[in-house]
Structures are given as structure tokens and as C-alpha cells.
Image: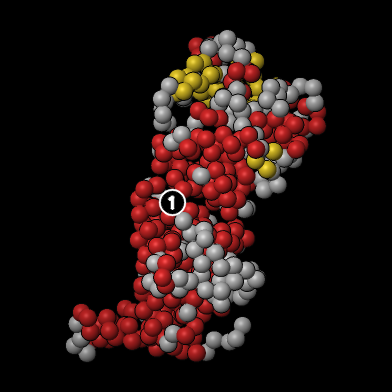
Amino acid sequence: MEIFVVGGAVRDALMGLPVSDRDWVVVGTTPEAMAEQGYLPVGKDFPVFLHPQSREEYALARTERKTARGYKGFAVQAAPDVTLEEDLARRDLTINALAVPAALAHVPAAQWQGHMVDPWGGLRDLQARVLRHVTGAFAEDPVRILRLARFAARFTDFTVADETLQLMRQMVEDGEVDHLVPERVWQEIARGLMTNKPSRMFEVLRTCGALQVLLPELDRLWGVPQRAEHHPEIDTGVHVMMVLDQCARLQAPLSVRWAALMHDMGKGTTPADVLPRHIGHEGRSAKLAQKVAQRLRVPGDCKELAEVVAREHGNIHRSGELNAAATLRLLTRCDAIRQSGRFALVLQACEADARGRLGLEDSDYPQARRLAQALDAALGVITADIAAAAARDGLKGAQIGERIEAARIMAVAHRIHGLPDE
């Protein structure tokens, strides 16, 4: 029995990046022998075991052969005679098809020379900063197109090999991407959104044609013009990518980044004869964001935030022009009084939107401060006391609500008119 650490842990160590999780492959043994040594079987589709002390996962070396389209269309064989090289042959990229003996897993990568197993030239591609597919295996699983795009967003100084890009285009043309399971698409998109350059993921997907299949609502934004006085970058697709990268710059959470991706979807449906204006695009964007979320089975927090941002971002940008009553109505539409934490995320998405424009990347966004303080003022109103006083005056139901609203408007008016310039 031989044990190797493989894949991302080897890649990251060679790049000088921190290694958090390690993937272990075991060669030359059987599930029964693993169990006898105290390893706990946990795999359903193929033999995976938990180490008796570290609880890390150890997988038996295996081969995979595509038998049909779809996530479960693979025949898996794990046997004592499956070699490490055969196991590495099923990996997606050459830089992920590297292995070192377990004995060297915790020593500096500089000491690995002469001990690495590298049948696909992964070390060469790592040094050349190239993302290249493993011949044969990559084409058998279209989710690997998404994985490569995600790696391109994570490792922004890497280029995609020409032959790999050609293969990805052929896979799209052959309809392979059409059969991806929504959960797998969302999983890869979500991970790509959380990189330091998420726009790169969508750039790669668009270049190979996969974006048109997976997110046609996003793909059609490129080439749609906007008014130059508001959007010096003109192109809507370019703008959305700039907003996304601003989210990364702000270290925004996933829900904010998803909302940024969705916020201008409606501009892709603006009639050509009214361009570059986009009257009513906010409502159309909210509906499209809901449609995409349902199709990809997006988590509820991401779905809900995207709908609010899509619907209200224009009003939030113009909120400096609103009086106290209109400001409170905006807060109410955003459900800010009940969900103040979510409203902070709405403001962060809108800040990224305002900065995601050519030449405005470092601009201030006073709307966020103003609305945050208006919300603070509204939350400071003690509604129980007002309701009790109104009841003593003989008021009921909606009348009590009106009195509470009036008190909140007064509190907001006092706060926003008294705000300092900074």
C-alpha cells in the first residue's frame, strides 16, 4: 500500500500558497484492507475512508469512464491494480494532476524535486502559468469548463491554453453544457464569485460560448449601450463585470456579489429604439433575477438580496434627493426596519454599482451613510410607547400605524437634515 497527497494541495504548496485541505490517494490496496487498519468507510459512489486519527479523507485510486451524459453518467473502478498515473489521468487540469508521497506531504515543496509524480506536465504548466486540460478526462465532464473558468478567476496571471479553449468551445457546440445539473452550476459559480477577480470567470465562460448557454440573460448584456454621462464605460456587460470586481475589492459576501451580477439584467431586454436609455429596467431586472435564481436553485439569501438590489438600486442612488417621508418609504420597500443587516448588504451592492464605472472606481458613496443613519433614526423610535399612547387616545389598528410612521418620519427628518458633510 502506497499513499500520496494529490491535486490542489500539491499545486498550492508549489505556488507558495497556504494549504488547508489535503486530498490523499491510496494505491495497491482494497477496501477490506483499509477497514482492517481502522479506516472508516464513508464513500457512496467510490471507496473513500476517514483516517482513524486525523479524520482526513483517503480515497482508493480509481478510474472513471463516461457512460452517459449527466452527473451520474460515469463508471467508476477502484481496484488494487489501478495505478497512481491512472488516477491522475482523471483529473481536470495538468496543474491538478500532481502527486507526492505522503512522507513528503509536510516538508517544504522545495524538497520535493525528484519525488513528484507528474505524468501530464503539470509542473511545467505551473511554472509557465498555463491552464491546460488533461487529455481525455476533461472532455468527459462539462462541469470542468466551469472549474477552469473559476481557476482563471483565482489565478489571474494564468492563461488558458489554446488547445484547451478550442476543446471547451467544441464541448459547448456538442451540447455538453446543456446537460449540467443546476446544483453543480451554482456551486462553481458561487466559488468563482468569491475569488479576487470574479469577472475573469465570466470572461472565460463567454469566450468559449458557455455563458450563452448557462446565463443567457447575462451574456446578452455585452454590446448593450448605456448613457455615457452615467456610464463612461458605455457597455452594460463591461459595467456589470466592473461592479463584480468592486464587490471583491470591498470583500463583499456571496449574496452581495450575486446581487451585483443580477442587478442590471433588465437592460438586456430594453427595446432598441429607446437605447441608450433604460426606463423601467429595475423591475425587469428583478423579474429576471428571480427567474435565474429558480433555474439555478440559488439559495434564498442570495435570491432575495438580488431582487431587492435589482428593484431599488436606482432609487438608492438618487436617495439624496428624497425628503424624509420618501426616504422612509424606500426603507420600508427594502424591509430595512425588519432586516437591517440585509439592508447593509443592499447598500454595499449599490456602492459597488456606483463605483463599477470607468473613472469612478474610487468615488465616494454618501448615499450609504445617509440611508444608514436614516435607518438608525427610524429604528430609534420606540414604537411600543407610541402605540400605548395612541391607544389611550382611542386610536386603533391603522391609526396607530400612521402615528408610528409619523414619528419615524420626524426622526428621519431630524437625522438626515442634521447630518454633517462627512
Give the vertical position of 389 relative to 211 (above or below).
Answer: below
Going by the numbered disc 1, the residue's amino acid type is Pro
Task: Between residue 285 and residue 44, name the one nearer to us.
Answer: 285
Residue 117 is left or right of residue 171, and the answer is right
Residue 120 visible, this angle: yes
Label 1, residues with CA under 10 Å away: few <14, some 14-19, many ≥20: some
Give the vertical position of 315 relative to 45 (above or below).
Answer: below
Residue 323 is left or right of residue 106, and the answer is left
**Furthest residue to the front?**
273
Color style of the picture: secondary structure
Point out residue 273 in the picture as x, y percentages from the top left corner. Answer: 41, 70
Give the vertical position of 283 relative to 187 (above or below).
Answer: below
Q: Quadrant of residue 269?
A: bottom left
**Furthest residue to the top?**
81
Residue drawn at x 57%, y 13% is 82
Task: Say which residue label 1 marks.
Answer: 216
Point out residue 362 in the picture as x, y percentages from the top left corner. Answer: 65, 70
Quadrant that contains the N terminus? top right
Quadrant that contains the C terminus? bottom right
Task: Between residue 145 and residue 60, name the one nearer to us.
Answer: 145
